[in-house]
Image: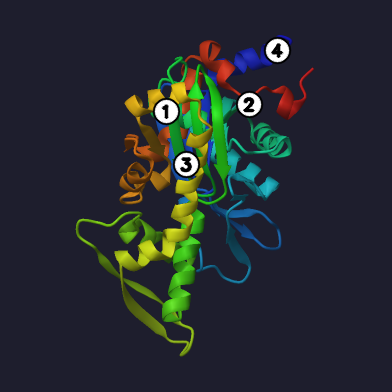
C-alpha cells in the first residue's frame, strides 16, 4: 500500500481498537487501555426517518416497550450483518464513544474485527465496508475462534495443537489450531439466541405462557444448564397466558429448562465431536494434555464443561472472562501488529486489494 501522510498523521491521534462485533453484544478493546465498552448490539430506530433513537444498553432496555413510531432491532443475525446502514451507525457510535472515553479527539483508528469462521466473502466485505464507513482508517478481519483462542491464552502460534469452542449469541465456532492456522473448523448457527428461542417455545407449548426474548435470556442465564446440577434450581417466570390473555407467573425448574435446551445443546456437542473426528491423531494427543477451551457467553451455561467432558473424554475448561476472549484477542493483534498481522484474513478476499 502506498504511503499516505494523512493516515500516518492520524495514527498519532487515534487509538487502534479491536472489536468483537457480536450478534448479542459488541465489545471494544482499545490498544493500551483494554476493554472500554461492552454493550448489547441493539439499535432503536425511528420507523419513518430510519435514524437511531438509542444504541446499545439504552436500546436493549426499550425492547418490547417502544411506542408505535420506534422499533428496537439487532442489526446482526447469526454473527453477520443483516442491516448494513444500521450496523454502520452502531459501529460509528461505539468507535466515537471509545475515543471519547480515552480523550482522543480524532476517531480514525486502525480496527481489527472478529467475524465467524464460516462467513462468506460477501459477508466479510459487508463487515469491512461497515467499519470503514464508520470512520476506521484501516480494517483487518480475524476469524472469531482464532481471536478467542488468542484472548484465552492458548498457544496458537506453536506447533502443539489446541482447540477452542466459542459459543456466542448467533454462532457457535469450533476450531482446532496449530502453527497460527486453523486445522479443522466448524461454524454452527445454533448458539445463545437459539437457546433463548427453545425456552420461549417450551413455555408456550407446556404452559401456554407467552414470554419475550429478554425473559427467555434471563431464564437461560439464571437456571439454564447442560448437565444435572448438584442442587436443582427454580425461578418464577412472568408472561401472558395465551388462553385467558391475562398476566401469569409460573414456577419452573432447572430440570425443565435443561429439557427445553436439550436439542440445541446436543447439536453443539455433536458438532464438537465431528470436529474432533477430523482432527489429526497427533493433535488429538496434544488435546489430551491441554484440554478443550470454552469461550463466549455460552461458556457460562452451567454444567456445559462437564457435559462436554463426559461425552468427549477430554478435559474441558472455561476461559477466564469467556465473553471478552474475542475482543482481547483482537486487541493482542494490535499490541504487536507487525508480528501477528499474518493471523488476519487475507485482504484479497474482502477488499480485492491490488
Q: Position of residue 204 (x, y in %)?
A: 47, 76
Whole-number angstrom distance, CA of label 1 to CA of label 2: 19 Å
Q: Which residue is mark 4?
A: 4
| Residue under numbered circle 3 | 273
Q: Nearer the viewer, mark 3 or mark 1?
A: 3
Q: Nearer the viewer, mark 4 or mark 1?
A: 1
Pick the front one: 354 or 190: 190
User: In 3D space, how far apart are the residues under numbered discs 4 and 1 (Cα atoms)?
Assistant: 31 Å
Q: What residue would you read off at disc 1?
A: 151
Mark 4 or mark 1: name the one nearer the start of the chain: 4
Q: Real-space Cα distance between discs 2 and 3?
A: 34 Å
Which quarter of the figure is the C terminus placed in?
top right
Nearer the observer: mark 2 or 3; the answer is 3
How packed mark 3 is, by other alpha carbons closer than 10 Å (few <14, some 14-19, many 20 or more), is: some
Write down the quadrant of residue 124 in the picture.
top right
Marks 3/4: CA–CA distance: 48 Å
Spot occupied by residue 246 in the image (x, y as percentages of width and height): 43, 87
What number is the disc on residue 256? none
Residue at point 70%, 12% (across, down): 4
Contact (CB < 8 A) between labels 2 and 3? no
| Label 2 secondary element | strand
State which quadrant residue 110 falls in.
top right
Q: Is residue 19 above or below residue 286?
A: below
Q: Work out how far the residue at label 3 is from the one at label 1, CA to CA, in angstroms.
A: 23 Å
Indicate which disc, 3 or 4, sits on the residue closer to the N terminus. Answer: 4
Residue shown at 35%/72% (left/top)? 237
Front disc: 3 or 4: 3
**Residue 139, numbered label:** 2
Amino acid at each position: 500500500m502506498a504511503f499516505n501522510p494523512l493516515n500516518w498523521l492520524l495514527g498519532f491521534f487515534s487509538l487502534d481498537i479491536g472489536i468483537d462485533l457480536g450478534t448479542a453484544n459488541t465489545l471494544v478493546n482499545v490498544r493500551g487501555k483494554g476493554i472500554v465498552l461492552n454493550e448489547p448490539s441493539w439499535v432503536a430506530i425511528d420507523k419513518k426517518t430510519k435514524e437511531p433513537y438509542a444504541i446499545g444498553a439504552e436500546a436493549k432496555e426499550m425492547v418490547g416497550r417502544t411506542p408505535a413510531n420506534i422499533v428496537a432491532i439487532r442489526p446482526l443475525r447469526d454473527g453477520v450483518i443483516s442491516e448494513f446502514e444500521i450496523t454502520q451507525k452502531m459501529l460509528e457510535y461505539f468507535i466515537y464513544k471509545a475515543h471519547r472515553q480515552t480523550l482522543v479527539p480524532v476517531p480514525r483508528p486502525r480496527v481489527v474485527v472478529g467475524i465467524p469462521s464460516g462467513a462468506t466473502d460477501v459477508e466479510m466485505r459487508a463487515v469491512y465496508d461497515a467499519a470503514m464507513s464508520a470512520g476506521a482508517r484501516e480494517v483487518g478481519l480475524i476469524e472469531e475462534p482464532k481471536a478467542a483462542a488468542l484472548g484465552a491464552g492458548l498457544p496458537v502460534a506453536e506447533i502443539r495443537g489446541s482447540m477452542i469452542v466459542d459459543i456466542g449469541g448467533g454462532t457457535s465456532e469450533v476450531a482446532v489450531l496449530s502453527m497460527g492456522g486453523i486445522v479443522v473448523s466448524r461454524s454452527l448457527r445454533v448458539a445463545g439466541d437459539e437457546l433463548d428461542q427453545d425456552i420461549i417455545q417450551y413455555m408456550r407449548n407446556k404452559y401456554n405462557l407467552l414470554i419475550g426474548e429478554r425473559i427467555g435470556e434471563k431464564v437461560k442465564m439464571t437456571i439454564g444448564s447442560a448437565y444435572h446440577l448438584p442442587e436443582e434450581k427454580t425461578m418464577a417466570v412472568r408472561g401472558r397466558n395465551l388462553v385467558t390473555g391475562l398476566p401469569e407467573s409460573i414456577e419452573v425448574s432447572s430440570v425443565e429448562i435443561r429439557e427445553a435446551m436439550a436439542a440445541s445443546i446436543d447439536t453443539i456437542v455433536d458438532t464438537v465431536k465431528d470436529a474432533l473426528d477430523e482432527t489429526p491423531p497427533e493433535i488429538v494427543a496434544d488435546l489430551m494434555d491441554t484440554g478443550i477451551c470454552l469461550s463466549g457467553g455460552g461458556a457460562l451455561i452451567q454444567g456445559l464443561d462437564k457435559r462436554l467432558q463426559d461425552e468427549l473424554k477430554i478435559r474441558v475448561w472455561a476461559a477466564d472472562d469467556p465473553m471478552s476472549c474475542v475482543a482481547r484477542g483482537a486487541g493482542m493483534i494490535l499490541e504487536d501488529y507487525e508480528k501477528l498481522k499474518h493471523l488476519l484474513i487475507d485482504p484479497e478476499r474482502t477488499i480485492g486489494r491490488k
